[in-house]
Image: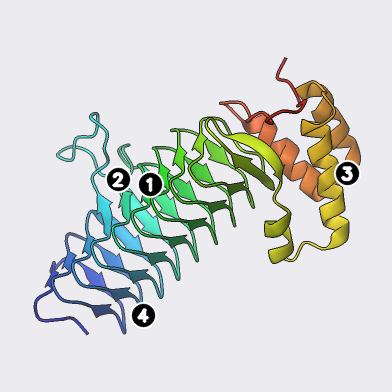
Amino acid sequence: MVHHTALVDSAARIGEGVRIGPYAVIEGSVRIGPGCTIMAHAWIGGNTSLGEGCVVHPHAVLGDVPQDFSYDPARMCSSLEIGNFCVFREGVTVHLSSRDGGRTVIGNHVYMMACSHVGHDGVIGDHVTMANSALLAGHVVVGERAFISGNVSVHQHVHIGKLAMIGASTFVSQDIPPFCTAQGVPGRVVCLNTVGLKRNGYDQQRRTALKKVFRLLYRQGLSLEGALAQLDQLEDQDADCVSGFIRATKRGIASSRGHGRADES
């Protein structure tokens, strides 16, 4: 059902059972999957696609041009790809990629609370939650089931690992390894994300193994190379996830407040 005051471009493709509310604007070759709800005054444009069952609340803006001075919409074409069953609350903004042919990607079951923002070329994994006014700069990558609290700011090109937890009002300037909790300005790793692990079905045995991983990285004063060598000896899938993340980092991993850590030297 499309409200008579909504503006829907003739080039847009609207799936079965989509509801579009009053004064919503669907501009350009947007693709909206079946069962989506677009509420009043929402704006969706650019080369944007939404999967099945997404909900877009009032005044959310999806697929506008990136906040990048190098982007020229007259000669560049990029996209925003959104998965299934995502929720975008009031005032959320998600921008197109700033690269010609590039993509900003939002996974499945992502929940973005009011006034949160994903900048150009971001990649957000499945089941990620971003609380109110969480702000991600360009090229940020967030792993699946991470939780980003309110008023968090994340520097461009930062990677946040799966099942990481970022505490309220944190400024993240270095990568946060999987399964860890970070807090503060600048963001420091403070503990394992035990609550998140429990909520996502990690049993006592896996949590105990991850505590050993955390201690090797942040509590024993090892060099980063030494910690990685010991992680490799564990032959554990979660340890492999952490070591693979660290080896891929380009910004370095966040240190731990008040404790020894795996040093990068």
- Kindly identify which residue carries mark 2: 78
In this rendering, is residue 185 above or below 224?
below
Between 260 and 73, the residue placed more toward the observer is 260
At label 1, the amino acid type is: Arg
- Kindly identify which residue carries mark 3: 235
The local crowd at label 1, few if under 14, some if 14 to 19, many if 20 or more residues have their Cα within 10 Å, is many
Q: How far apart in space, not on screen, are marks 1 and 4 (Cα)?
A: 24 Å
Are the residues flagged by discs 1 and 2 in contact, CB closer than 8 Å?
Answer: yes
Are the residues flagged by discs 2 and 4 in contact, CB closer than 8 Å?
Answer: no
Are the residues flagged by discs 4 and 3 in contact, CB closer than 8 Å?
Answer: no
Which numbered dot is residue 103?
1
Left or right: where 254 falls relative to 80: right
Residue at image location 25% in from the left, 44% down from the top: 77
The local crowd at label 3, few if under 14, some if 14 to 19, many if 20 or more residues have their Cα within 10 Å, is few
At label 4, the amino acid type is: Gly
Between 87 and 221, the residue placed more toward the observer is 221
Q: Earlier in the sequence, mark 3 or mark 1?
A: 1
Residue 113 percent location from the top left of the image: 41, 60
Q: How far apart in space, not on screen, are marks 4 and 3 (Cα)?
A: 44 Å
Q: Earlier in the sequence, mark 2 or mark 4?
A: 4
At label 3, the amino acid type is: Glu
Q: Earlier in the sequence, mark 4 or mark 3?
A: 4
Residue 165 percent location from the top left of the image: 61, 49
Q: Nearer the viewer, mark 1 or mark 4?
A: 4
Outermost residue toward the top?
265
Q: Nearer the viewer, mark 2 or mark 4?
A: 4
- Kindly identify which residue carries mark 4: 35
Q: Secondary structure at mark 1?
A: strand
Residue 41 percent location from the top left of the image: 18, 67
